[in-house]
Image (spheres, rainbow, N blue to C red):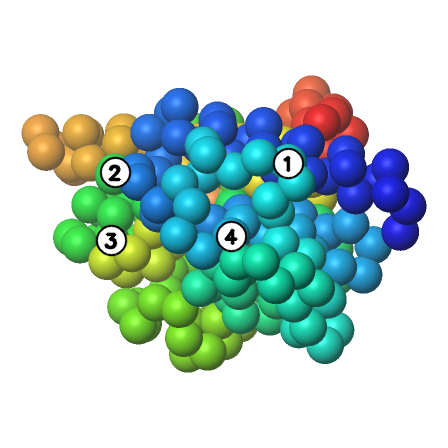
Amino acid sequence: MTVQLEQQVREELTKYARKTVAKGLVVGPGGNISAKAGNIMLLSPSGFALEDIEPEQWIRVEIDSGNVLDQEVRPSSEVLMHLFAYRVNPDIQAIVHTHPAHCIALTLVSKELPMLFPDQAALVGDIAFVPYVLPTTDLLANAVAEKVGDHNSILLENHGLVTTGKNLREAYYRTEVVEESAKVYLAAKAVGEPKVLTDAEYKEIQSLESEAYRVQLLQKMK
């Protein structure tokens, strides 16, 4: 890992951490995000509001061993959740864990988030659901790790949302799309039974060349 790569990842983490706060996806010191830089991950420090983290304050943690390389402050209390996800699925390059209001509200009344519109189908796909597990524990880390091989977005009952991506941009925009999906679903459900996309309609959207291009572009951009 080069110093240049690590600095680039630090700057991207700072950028998307502030976006999550600006969009109301977390409040106070809630939520945590990370990204890989070679064989380490850079993770938000414990007790910090995401918008207050400066590039030099992201905590380095070895993915294979779990050794924390920076001792000034502790890494996020959800460090195990991030580590286990990276170990299970090496394709994951970034993880965004937030507490979006509509996502949390949805988990209080539903065990699923159906497929509703094209962006959800193309950028997110099937969304996993994890029943309530005590936060910051290896139980939650294991529950999330069981899902990240097949799902890039995971709703945590009474807790929040975890999204992954090939870069921070992809993981972050998946967070936005899932939160918008939850918002739309709850609004529709309040007045009637929502019309959801059929499996055929969902697969048709995913097969579009234009959508494949958009996803590929998202993965390349920072």
Estimate the spatial distance between the alpha carbons at disc 3 and disc 4, rounded to whole Å: 27 Å
Please name which of the two marks, 3 or 4, marks the residue nearer to the observer. Answer: 4
The amino acid type of the residue labelled 2 equals: His
Could you tell me which secondary element the residue under label 2 belongs to?
Answer: helix
Q: Position of residue 40 (x, y in %)?
A: 75, 59
Q: Residue furthest top?
A: 210
Residue positioned 34% across, 38% down in the render: 26
Whether residue 3 sits left or right of residue 217 in the image: it is right
Q: Splitting the image into 4 quarters, where does residue 169 fall? A: top right
Alpha carbon separation for disc pair 2 and 1: 30 Å
- Mark 4 or mark 2: which comes first in sequence? 4
Q: Residue 145 placed where, x, y %?
A: 55, 69
Q: Secondary structure at mark 4?
A: loop
- Is disc 3 placed on a helix, strand or loop? helix
Residue 107's disc is 3
Picture residue at 17% right of the left edge, 54% below the top: 108
Q: Callout 1: 10 Å neighbours few (<14), some, many (20+)?
A: some
Residue type indicated by callout 1: Pro
Who comes first in sequence, dot 3 or dot 1?
1
Q: Earlier in the sequence, mark 1 or mark 4?
A: 4
Q: CA distance from mark 3 to mark 1?
A: 33 Å
Check disc 1 and report the residue beneath it. Answer: 55
Gap in Å between the C-alphas at discs 4 and 2?
26 Å
Indicate the quadrant where residue 196 lies.
top left
Give the residue pinned by disc 4.
Answer: 45
Q: How far is the residue under mark 3 from the one under mark 2?
A: 9 Å
